Image (tube, grey):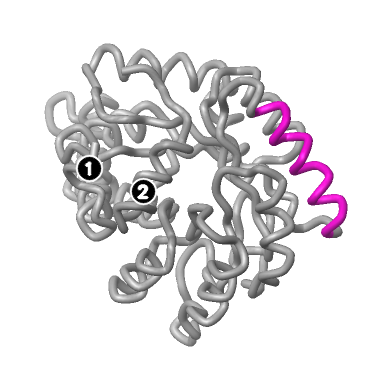
Amino acid sequence: MALVSAKGILETARDGHYAVPAININNLEWSKAVLETAQELNSPILLAVSEGAGKYMGGYKTIVGMVNGLIEELNITVPVALHLDHGSFEGAKECIAAGFTSVMYDGSALPFDENLAQTKEIVRLAHEQGVSVEAEVGSIGGEEDGIVGTGELADPAECKTIADTGIDFLAAGIGNIHGKYPENWAGLSFETLEAIKAATGNIPLVLHGGSGIPEDQIKKAIDLGVAKINVNTECQLVFAEATRKYIEAGKDLEGKGFDPRKLLAPGATAIKEAVREKIEVFGSANKA
């Protein structure tokens, strides 16, 4: 199945009261593990790529070629969108040209009027190519590719103004954080989420920083209109842990255990288990 826009995936999720995982990918193993797990659980999926990961993997065209090849060779039949995560204005334009089917333009660190103007331009360029667009209001806490946010609560009025540009889904800060959540984290602000939902109407909402949010808060957020939940840190942590255990056990010194296909296999398996858990918690299993 060819890559598709995320618009239909997330509108169906919103109407069905479940959320679709957007899993950040970092290499071939990551991409393959996520696609195979989505296929096994019959779940739609978004493969998310940060600009830093895009550079690491050799560029956006390289990623498009790899993902399209995997979908064909692995016979992936569930809906898959290839999505730019926290993209700059220029990065979003590059991904549209390279063949991504969804982009996030993140102008949340800019003055609001500038964010609004650039969001409108990305919407115009993306929709000409059938590419879906996500925008952000209110900086998400934590760090993502060197961008640090303090976890603002988005202004519902600004959310409505951005939503009215024609974007397909909206990320709004509701106290969520990228990376590990601190012990003193106050939790999600459902009051803010409810106000944003009331202001923006039926647009699918996005929850960034999905690694580490308690399951009960995840499910309440889905009930309030969240249709896409981003997961990155958790997969990185389990990948690192499984790889560390393999090496500490001396497996890389046994036979041809140093072969990267063997060395990276435990980490890839750990990613599959993490993605499986997210699909089940978010409710997207058997929704393809």
Give the main secondary structure, helix, strand or loop, of the magenta stretch.
helix
Q: Is residue 251 above or below residue 207?
A: above
Query: In which quadrant of the rendered view does residue 254 lie?
Result: top left
At mark 1, the secondary structure is: loop
In the image, 234 versus 244, the foreground residue is 234
At mark 2, the secondary structure is: strand
* Residue 128, image x, y percentages: 66, 22
Q: Which residues are magenta?
A: 112-126
Mark 1 and mark 2: span between their CA atoms?
Answer: 12 Å
* Residue 199, image x, y percentages: 62, 67
How would you rate the neighbour count of disc 2 (Cα within 10 Å): few for under 14, some for 14-19, many for 20 or more?
many
* Residue 150, image x, y percentages: 66, 72
Residue at the spot 29% in from the left edge and 13% down from the top edge? 72
Check disc 1 and report the residue beneath it. 287
Query: In which quadrant of the rendered view does residue 51 lie?
Result: top right
Residue type, numbered disc 1:
Lys
Question: Is residue 114 rendered to the left or right of residue 81?
Answer: right
Q: Is residue 207 above or below residue 261?
A: below
Q: Nearer the viewer, mark 1 or mark 2?
A: 1
Check disc 2 and report the residue beneath it. 21
Question: Is residue 211 rendered to the left or right of residue 36?
Answer: right
Check if residue 13 falls in the magenta segment: no
In the image, 91 versus 166, the foreground residue is 166
* Residue 226, image x, y percentages: 43, 60
Give whichever of discs 1 and 2 has the lower sequence position.
2
Any part of residue 112 in sight: yes
Q: Is residue 97 above or below residue 79?
A: above
Quadrant into which the C terminus falls: top left
Check if residue 125 falls in the magenta segment: yes
Q: Are marks 1 and 2 in contact (CB under 8 Å)?
A: no
